[in-house]
Amino acid sequence: MDMMLTRWKIMFISVAINLAAISLSPSLYASDMELQASVTVPEYQGAYSGELLWEGIVTMAGDVLILEGGTLTVRAGTQINIVPAEGTKIDPEYLSSQTELLIRGKLDIQGTPDLPVRFVIVETSATEEIAWSGIALDKAAESRIRYVELERADIAVRCVTSSPEIKGNRIANCRYGIVAQQKSHPKILENILLDGEGGIFCWRGSNPYLLNNQITGHDEEAVFVDETSRPWLEHNMISGNTIGLALYPRDLPFDPESVTDNSENVRWLGRQGQVGVE
Amino acid sequence: MRWWCLLMIVMPLFGPISASAGESQVYKGEQTLFEDTVWSGDILIDGILTVATGTTLEIRPGSRVRFTRFDSNGDGIGEHEIFSQGTIRVLGTEDDPVLFTSAEETPRPGDWGAINMMVSEEENLLGHCIVEYGYRGFHAHFSRAKLLNSTFRKNMRGAQFQESQVVIDGCRFLDNNNGVQFRDSKVTLQGSTISGSHWGLRCVYSDLEMTACVIENNLVNGVNIRDGKIHARGNRIVGNRRGLYLQRSEGRVVSNDLSGNSEHGIFLEDSNGEVIDNRLIGNGRAGVRWLNSKGRLTRNMITDNGVYGLINDGTSAVDARSNWWGTAKSGDIDASIRDGLDRPELGLVDSRDALVQSLPFNLLETP
């Protein structure tokens, strides 16, 4: 009996000490994280209609498609784990063999400067440098992508006949930062794009509004504009890229003082390498 | 159970629910054709219709085959379809094509499954037909088929097949989400158009003979060959994001027009290519992007491309002798090439013996 009591006392004291340690210790945050990790993280893959809400920590275990009429809302502070795809398969309704977030409905990512939404790659030994496809909007409804941290995508944000607001995001080490094609007119505001192959591409009648973006460290073009597109460029900082502006339209207005310290600040396109002012 | 009792139970599985003149033949639920069958007029598939091994389904000119939409799991994809392990022969004519379509009032891509073939090794034929609003218009595994003079439009994917032998001649794949995809297959594609898709043609581990086709206005790559072989001759591959992209593949690319693509006319990555007598004009970023590939680039017209005529992004040298670069000035030719002279970590390009004028370019007659 005494022995039994002693055991209960030891257990009680032990639990009390642990509780005190948790409540007093500066490692409270770490304990919370461990607790969260022990809770099952919701996993998503496949096609979704209706309203879908992501918050806390979620995992994209494969491609996610938001169907026409559906909405994906992502709360501020959400962490989205990306599991890279293996293999070369693309089902007919998708666009890439890599893991992708494909929006044919509406996307509302509600990050804030203090609580950004983070896309985090789940690394394996086979994960390649470009680890996932990125976010694609294909004839999407009015959407916004705010304060996202996103890296190592093939195209961080691809707009096809879609005109979302893309604001305050940090896009790093992607092959392409933002692609606007097929009459897409996104508002691209206050983003940081760095260290990719190319920054922002305007193709096939796309007229995005670029305001207060910082585009730096790209191996090729920071901003590329084809013959049929007319972006509006205002107060962007474009520096440290191989080519700052690569432009087909000779009359596109831009502020030369915002395009500095690139290996080549402006390249007029269509003359395959022959540099010079028109 | 007496034999006639069994027959009474099984009989409905063999034939349509109704088949009176002037009305649709209706196949409801899961049914199987065990005897050779000929269709004409209106047919409604309200379920999954299987064509059994050894059975032939023949569809006469002017027939209309409609599929109801049934999406059991809410993924936006209809599941009703034709599933054949026998033989399908669609015998439309130019004046009286056979139509495969959705039965919905407001049809959309993916309303129904596919004309689906599994281990169907007799010669299947889809001649002069229109296939629309399916998930995969034509789909096959371990099968042989000819798709002739037909149109596949507004499907999620126009055609998809694996481990099959397929001839596609005179067909049009228009405004599908993705155009044509196959793997482990041997394919002849001629006189056909693939337009208005995300991916135009994408294949893996396959052997493709492509002649006199038009591949245009696709939003990803016009033609994407991965771990395969292509012989492309006399095609127009224009206005796509990338024109022709070879990844770990072998290609003989002769007398094609690879122009006006948003990025590159042709992109070879870890591949072996013979790129001869092509037009590579007005592509957005470069006429040619060459990355750690072997082969040669010769007698091509490489002019008026966006940033460069040729980019060598690999460490190996590129044999690019005897091309027309739009100029005879050696300084201008050098400027149109990016290689190890611009970035020391890259291989060099041999552009000697540059042509002093363009060669005549004769494209085969395309649709």
Image: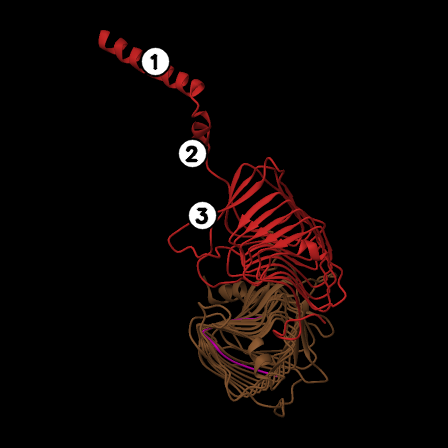
Chain colours: A red, B brown
Figure check: B157 above or below A152: below
Q: Which residue is mark 2?
A: A38
Residue B163 forms part of the magenta stretch: yes
- Where disc 2 sits, the SS reads helix
Mark 1 is on which residue type? Phe
Pointers 1 and 2 within a single chain: yes
Circle 3 packing at 10 Å, graded few (<14), some (14-19), many (20+), is some
Q: Which residue is labeled 1 in the image? A: A12
Q: Answer above or below: position of B126 versus B15.
A: below
Q: Given the image, on which type of amino acid does mark 2 rest?
A: Ser
CA separation in Å, label 3 and label 2: 17 Å
* Mark 1: secondary structure: helix
Subunit of mark 3?
A
List the residue tagged with mark 3.
Answer: A122
The nearer-to-camera label among 1 and 3 is 3
**Closer to the camera in the image, B253 or A141:** B253
Q: Which residues are magenta?
A: B159-169
The residue type indicated by label 3 comes to Val
Q: Is residue B213 left or right of residue B186?
A: right
- Please state which of residues B365 and A130 is positioned toward the viewer in this rendering: A130
**Would you identify the image quadrant in which residue A229 lies?**
bottom right
